[in-house]
Amino acid sequence: MDKKVALVTLIENSFVLPNEVKLELLGRVEGLSDTDVEKLGTFLAAERQFVLDHEKGVRDSVAEILQMLDTPKPEPGDAVYVGTGRP
């Protein structure tokens, strides 16, 4: 695969780069030197690898958050105080 084509894919899928920067970089890819393509590609490949390496932890955290959001919270008037003499 051509390195510039691979770089475009990495730019489009980056989590770190804001959309404005992605658009600017995508517009400049064709004019980048091989050295710049290598440097940017190496950075974005490292970002992708980090995400893949930590995917399980992220998915576990998301599942925990979703479970917490699905758990109904008691309404303030629903509290029952056992053994305190309160209703």
Image (cartoon, helix red, strand yellow):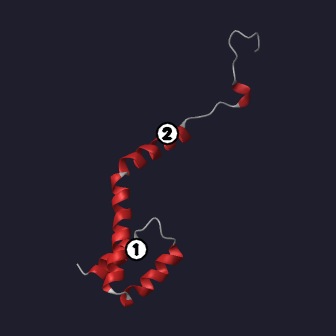
On the rendered structure, is 32 left or right of 62? Answer: left
70 relative to 16, above or below: above
Q: Which residue is mark 2?
A: 67
Real-space Cα distance between discs 2 and 1? 33 Å
> Mark 2 touching mark 1, by CB under 8 A?
no
Query: Hey, which quadrant is residue 11 in on the image?
Result: bottom left
User: What residue appears at the point 69 percent right and 19 percent down from the top-left corner?
Assistant: 80
Query: Hey, which quadrant is residue 85 in on the image?
Result: top right
Which one is closest to the eye, mark 2 or mark 1? Answer: 1
Query: Hey, which quadrant is residue 37 in on the image?
Result: bottom left
At label 1, counting other C-alpha atoms closer than 10 Å, the crowd grade (few under 14, some 14-19, many 20 or more) is many
On the rendered structure, is 6 left or right of 11? Answer: left
Q: Amino acid at mark 1?
A: Ile
In terms of depth relative to the viewer, which is nearer, 3 or 86? 3
In terms of depth relative to the viewer, which is nearer, 31 or 80? 31
On the rendered structure, is 26 left or right of 69? Answer: left
User: What residue appears at the point 38 percent right and 69 percent down from the top-left corner?
Assistant: 44
Q: Which residue is mark 1?
A: 11
In x, y percent, where is residue 39? 35, 75
User: What residue appears at the point 70 percent right and 16 percent down from the top-left corner?
Assistant: 81
On the rendered structure, is 23 left or right of 75? Answer: left
Q: Amino acid at mark 2?
A: Gln
User: What residue appears at the point 40 percent right and 46 percent down from the top-left corner?
Assistant: 57
In x, y percent, where is residue 27? 44, 86
Kindly identify which numbered label has been placed on residue 1: none
Residue found farthest to the right: 86
Q: Which numbered disc flags the more N-terminal residue, 2 or 1?
A: 1
Where disc 1 sits, the SS reads helix
At label 2, counting other C-alpha atoms closer than 10 Å, the crowd grade (few under 14, some 14-19, many 20 or more) is few
